Amino acid sequence: MDVLVINGPNLNTLGTREPEIYGSTTLAEIEAGLVAQGAAAGLEVDTFQSNHEGAIIDRLHEARADGTRFIIINPGAFTHTSIAIRDALAAVAVPFCEVHISNVHAREEFRRHSFLSDLAVGVMAGFGPQGYSLAMAYAVQRLSAAGS
Ligand code: CA2
């Protein structure tokens, strides 16, 4: 596995509610676009979504075993609460990009703090669903430079 894309709680309902904040693109559409973007660059992309903190942590542990080279993660609200996901990302030690569809810095105060950002290679926030493809473009360039 080259790139693993993880989405956290409630993101499975993207495109169905609050389009003024999160847009009207569904998660299935985002994931399909990322798989195609990776494939065009010869990369294998896996996608995973869960509403459960432990399931996300289990998938991160699997990433260590399956040779994942880069992770794109939108942890949803766990961004602001989960030391456990932070610890899992630190333990797995796969470089990752944190993505937020909305600009978390222009919203409620509690969304400004992330337990992950200081471990991330970079953070995308506020670019809508395009943030995922910008992160994937970075991953493609990074992994191509590193060689196969
Ligand atoms: O902007 C983002 O991507 C967030 O990670 C989304 C989380 C939020 O808790 C973070 O602060 C920022 C919430 C995801 C909720 O997903 C929805 C999907 C469709 C409609 C409403 C919410």
Image (cartoon, rainbow, N blue to C red):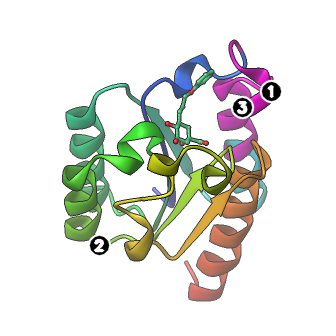
Give me the C-alpha separation between circle 2 and circle 3. Answer: 30 Å
Q: Does 94 sit left or right of 10 as displayed? A: left
Q: How far across and down, in percent of the image, does residue 51 sit?
A: 36, 25
Stretch of the chain drawn in magenta = 16-34
Do we see residue 42 in this rendering? Answer: no
**Within 8 Å of ligand 1, the CB of disc 3?**
yes
Under mark 1, the amino acid is: Glu
Q: Nearer the viewer, residue 61 or 113?
A: 113
Vertical placement of residue 59 versus 27, above or below: below
Which is more N-terminal, label 3 or label 2?
3
Number of the front mark, 2 or 3:
3
- Residue neighbourhood size for the residue with mark 1, other residues' Cα within 10 Å, grouped as few (<14), some (14–19), many (≥20): few
**Mark drawn on residue 93:** 2
User: Which quadrant, please, contains the N terminus?
Assistant: bottom left
Under mark 2, the amino acid is: Ala
Which is more N-terminal, label 2 or label 1?
1
Q: Nearer the viewer, residue 145 or 113?
A: 113
Q: Magenta segment: does it hold 20?
A: yes
Q: Secondary structure at mark 2?
A: loop
Q: What residue would you read off at disc 1?
A: 20
Give me the C-alpha separation between circle 1 and circle 2. Answer: 35 Å
User: Which quadrant, please, contains the C terminus?
Assistant: bottom right
Q: Nearer the viewer, residue 46 or 7?
A: 7
- Residue 138, by quadrant, is bottom right
Q: Quadrant of ligand 1?
A: top right
- Residue neighbourhood size for the residue with mark 3, other residues' Cα within 10 Å, grouped as few (<14), some (14–19), many (≥20): many
Give me the C-alpha separation between circle 3 and circle 1. Answer: 6 Å
**Mark drawn on residue 22:** 3
